[in-house]
Image (cartoon, grey):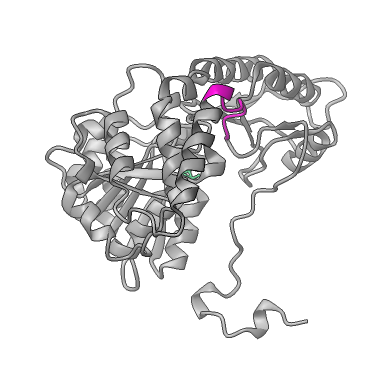
Amino acid sequence: MTSLDDLPIRDDLRGKSPYGAPQKVVPVALNVNENTHPIPEDVAHDIVARVAAAIIGLNRYPDREFTELRTALAAYLGHGLDPAQIWAANGSNEVLQHLLQAFGGPGRRALGFAPTYSMYTLLSAGTGTEWIAAGRDDEYELSPETAVAAIREHDPGVVFLCAPNNPTGTPLSIETIRAVADEARGIVIVDEAYHEFADPGTPSALTLLPGHPRLVVSRTMSKAFAFAGARVGYLAADPALTDALRLVRLPYHLSALTQAAALGALAHSGEMLAMVDEIRAQRERIFDELARLGFHPYRSGSNFVLFGGVDDPHAVFEALLEQGILIRDIGLPNSLRVTAGTETETTAFLEAIAAFAPGRPGSDGPNRMAS
Ligand SMILES: *Cc1c(COP(=O)(O)O)cnc(C)c1O
């Protein structure tokens, strides 16, 4: 059999690994930050009706400009946004790829603050963009000073700010975002994939769009909106910036079925987002309980919690998996990440993880408090 090494693959892709969060069928799947609540049935019926109607017209290409969808997304985001400021694609990963295709590329640098979303690195590699991993402050926080120093040092063409940050959950202050948007000469992408889970009152980077024509705010329907399987991501930016993305997208990249389904979900945004408060409550429960057990949970503004104080993350990951609970080992020392699920799923996780509490007699590690 031929192996990858035998193929004339691009030199800059040789030896790289694809995105690969395990996909396993388990009773409690808390590994990729999905909304674990299913779509309400009446919403599902409306989406089915809209998709069914769209099927009759599948002999024609879909609306290349997805005008109705942009209008609905602008209305959902508010902030006085015009549909011309909206762009969408098959998941925000494709939106980010469009941005790198248009503004990254050979000879250009993209900068992010590690540890951060692994797809930034992979999308940079795929577009021939050099990836620069700048550092964070203690506890994975990112102050305006630290962020601006990295921008001054590297002068990147594209900056990724993940707010709140995946995989750490860390909220990012609007002050840091503003400082970066003011300092950077390149495109500044604020990835707000988890914004709906932030504490109420947390300002969005959308508030900074006026006066910052190179600022991009990226969102997704995959997380709070409980629509991961449909693949819909979008952004808001200056109309000139969204216009640039027409140069790199494939023609008719958003299928008529995707557009119909997304419009159906957006027509019921209240119901689709109804579980967000409950999920936030489960996240807080996870944080409090892990701290009580002696783990070291990090501050989270998302629907997941990263926690340290795990002596052997791989062993704990496997032990939980044996009990049908899938969480995420993201390769950070002594740390694991868990998504806030339903109350029942969260309880299952908390009961299982208690057996590995630091210092607990019989746990496989030395007696010590979380650092
Ligand atoms: C999940 C996630 C996304 C969303 O990806 P989709 O392609 O929209 O499903 C984007 N950014 C971050 C940081 C994420 O964690």
In this picture, which residue range is highlighted in magenta?
34-42
The answer to whether residue 41 is magenta is: yes
Residue at 81% over, 33% down: 324
Q: Main secondary structure of the magenta part?
A: loop
The answer to whether residue 35 is magenta is: yes
Residue at 42% over, 25% down: 269
Residue 255: percent from the left, percent from the top? Answer: 44, 53
Q: Is residue 3 above or below residue 184?
A: below
Residue 181: percent from the left, percent from the top? Answer: 22, 43
Where, quadrant-wise, is the C terminus in this rendering?
top right
Give the residue furthest to the front: 56
> 366 left or right of 260?
right
> 162 left or right of 139?
left
Give the residue furthest to the right: 362
In terms of image quadrants, where is residue 142? top left
Residue 119: percent from the left, percent from the top? Answer: 49, 53
Q: Is residue 266 above or below residue 162?
A: above
Residue at 36% over, 58% down: 98
> Can residue 147 be seen in the rendering of this structure?
yes
In terms of image quadrants, where is residue 194? top left
